[in-house]
Image (spheres, helix red, strand yellow):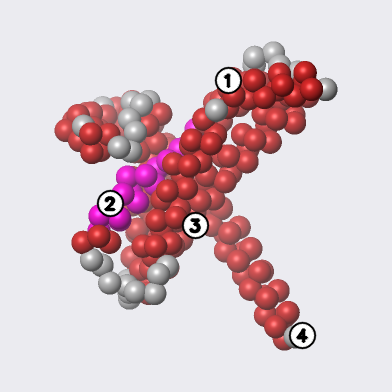
């Protein structure tokens, strides 16, 4: 049994070592969204705007985890036993992908909450669409161009030139557009589920307080 577990751990590190790192990158905008959008003060200082820029630079890392399904596909084609695939690969990969995307959903919901608080409710849907578009672009640049969030600081000119080139080239533009549509649809579904769970939790909380 120890040998099986040791082999499983080795296989996981080889094929799935990205999970911890990518979840960490997704966690950054998730945590920043609470500071930006959920704190009591609605003032926007210079530090707030700098944090806002960092938030958007890292935000595509959360939905980017959706594309990591390719690692699971590769693992299933590598000839590993059903035991390793069923008990290690599939659960951990699905956990990482779903957790990362849920962090994206909550981050965008926090953004909408903030807009409502400052009297800009009519811009919530537009901000969500714009966010999906920027993240679809970020996902493409990360997956196919292999750029990272910090390249926006390390090499902004090169990132800008390549981005503009891809946006004006047919194939990359189509991929980005399809990614945008997929991201928008998946976000809408996850948003309904998340809001439904929040509503259910509040109802249960209210009933508990009533009984107390």
Q: Is residue 52 magenta?
A: yes
Q: Which residue is mark 3?
A: 106
Q: Which residue is mark 4?
A: 211
What whole-number distance in Å separates the C-alpha atoms at marks 2 and 1? 34 Å
Query: Residue 81: percent from the left, percent from the top?
Result: 75, 18
Task: Tell me which numbered mark, 2 or 1, is placed earlier along the sequence.
Answer: 1
Q: Nearer the viewer, mark 3 or mark 1?
A: 1
Task: Tell me which numbered mark, 3 or 1, is placed earlier along the sequence.
Answer: 1
Proximity of marks 2 and 1: CB atoms separated by less than 8 Å: no
Helix, strand or loop under label 1: helix
What whole-number distance in Å separates the C-alpha atoms at marks 2 and 3? 18 Å
Q: Is residue 39 above or below residue 191?
A: below
**Left or right of 114: which side holds 198?**
right
Task: Tell me which numbered mark, 4 or 2, is placed earlier along the sequence.
Answer: 2
Query: Residue 127: percent from the left, percent from the top?
Result: 35, 58
Helix, strand or loop under label 2: helix
Residue at 63% x, 63% y: name it.
197
Query: Residue 171: percent from the left, percent from the top?
Result: 33, 25
Helix, strand or loop under label 3: helix
Other-residue count near label 1 (Cα within 10 Å), few / some / many at <14 / 14–19 / ≥20: few
Residue at 61% x, 34% y: name it.
93
Task: Tell me which numbered mark, 4 or 3, is placed earlier along the sequence.
Answer: 3
Which residue is more in the foreground, 153 or 104?
Answer: 153
- The dominant secondary structure in magenta is helix
Q: Nearer the viewer, mark 4 or mark 1?
A: 1
Other-residue count near label 3 (Cα within 10 Å), few / some / many at <14 / 14–19 / ≥20: some
Q: Which residue is mark 1?
A: 14
Q: Is residue 179 magenta?
A: no
């Amino acid at each position: 049994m120890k040998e099986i577990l040791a082999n499983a751990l080795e296989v996981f590190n080889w094929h799935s070592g990205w999970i911890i790192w990518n979840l960490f990158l997704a966690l950054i905008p998730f945590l920043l969204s609470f500071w930006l959008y959920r704190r009591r003060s609605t003032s926007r200082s210079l530090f707030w705007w700098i944090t806002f820029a960092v938030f958007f630079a890292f935000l595509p890392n959360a939905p980017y985890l959706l594309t990591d399904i390719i690692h699971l596909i590769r693992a299933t084609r590598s000839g590993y036993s059903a035991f390793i695939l069923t008990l290690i690969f599939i659960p951990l990969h699905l956990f990482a992908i779903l957790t990362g995307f849920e962090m994206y959903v909550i981050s965008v919901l926090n953004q909408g909450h903030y807009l409502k608080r400052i009297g800009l409710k009519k811009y919530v849907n537009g901000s969500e669409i714009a966010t999906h578009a920027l993240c679809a672009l970020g996902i493409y640049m990360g997956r196919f161009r292999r750029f990272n969030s910090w390249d926006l600081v390390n090499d902004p000119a090169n990132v800008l030139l390549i981005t503009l080139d891809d946006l004006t080239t047919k194939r990359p533009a189509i991929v980005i557009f399809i990614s945008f549509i997929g991201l928008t649809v998946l976000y809408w579904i996850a948003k309904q589920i998340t809001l439904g769970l929040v509503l259910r939790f509040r109802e249960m909380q209210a009933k508990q307080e009533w009984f107390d």
